[in-house]
Amino acid sequence: MHIFITEEFVSEVKPISKDKSHSDCETDLINSIFKKTIDEIKNVGTKRLGGQADKSPFLRKRIGSETSGKSGGYRLYFWLFILDKNIFLLFIHPKTGRRSASNISTEKQKDLVKTFKKCRDENLFYEVELDKKKTHTI
Amino acid sequence: MMTTTISNIGQEINQIISNSKSIPAKFSEEEKINRFLDGINNLRVKLVEKTEKIQKLDDLFSKLTWYDVKNQEEEDLMKKVISKSLSFHSKSIKNFVSLKRSFWKDKICRDEITNYKNTLDDFEDSIYEVKEIFFSLRKDSEFNDLMNSL
């Protein structure tokens, strides 16, 4: 399983990880995506927005306090595609804090699919791996 | 024989009367504390059970999204499930408000009450997400064309 990200995902993660309440968002990402199998990613707190369930699902995943070990109200949301056993992370937002939102619009979600298509067709995805200690992404 | 019998019965009556103590009209302090603690434990168990039920509902809402609505019957069922779940959520929120009003200031079951509220918030998010997924996003022709073009 390979994990890919977009420019937009990087530009979203950076300010979120600077926020005090989400400073461990990289760890959350590692624990809930990098250290999981595709089935585990699909089955825990994940809703299918569209796409074929077994081949190319477009998903919204919630990471809560049970995964992160944080206080009860802690929530992070990821938008991702799973295709050919690879994960494509497209967007992230927290539920609380300055960069929070309760949800994103239908239009924004369509934009994410367009971004996915463009990045795939023009080879604009960046592959991300864990470092040797498996505590950070590179 | 008769005297012996009367004597025996009399003794038995006396024994019962002397062994019979009045039922205290008030609880002792120890009993009061025990009943209070039992009440808190029962409340804690009920809150944990209700929270687990709502988490289960939340999981089921996630599972729904892995299916596609195939006909009008399924669409009507989805609408009913969403409507019923919103009513249940609203009723549960009122329950949360009265629980908080009764127990929060005395610091009783605060963690359980907070978890209950967080789980209810997740459940509410899930209901609206599922509604949006089935009745907006998957009915949007541009979204479907995009997904088919991948």
Image (cartoon, coloured by chain):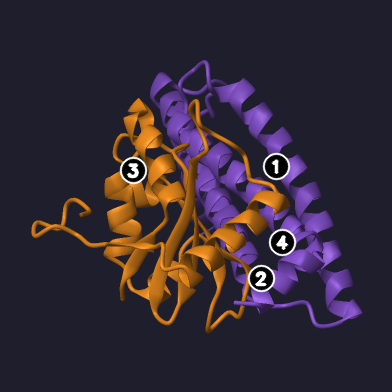
Chain colours: A orange, B purple
Q: According to the image, label 4 marks what residue?
A: B133
Spatial distance from mark 4 to mark 2, Cα to Cα?
10 Å
Compared to residue B78, the image places residue A75 above or below, namely above
Q: Which badge, 4 or 1, is on the more N-terminal residue?
A: 1
**Neighbour tally class for label 2: few under 14, some 14-19, many 20 plus, Cα within 10 Å:** some
Residue at 54% across, 20% down: B26
Name the amino acid, label 4.
Ile
Image location (x, y in percent) of residue A9: 43, 49
Q: According to the image, label 3 marks what residue?
A: A25
Residue at 31% across, 68% down: A36
Q: Please state which of the two labelled residues, at mark 4 or mark 2, is closer to the viewer.
A: 4
Q: According to the image, label 2 marks what residue?
A: B64
The disc numbered 4 marks a residue on which chain?
B
Name the amino acid, label 3.
Cys
Q: Nearer the viewer, residue B63 or A61?
A: A61
SS at mark 3 in the image: helix
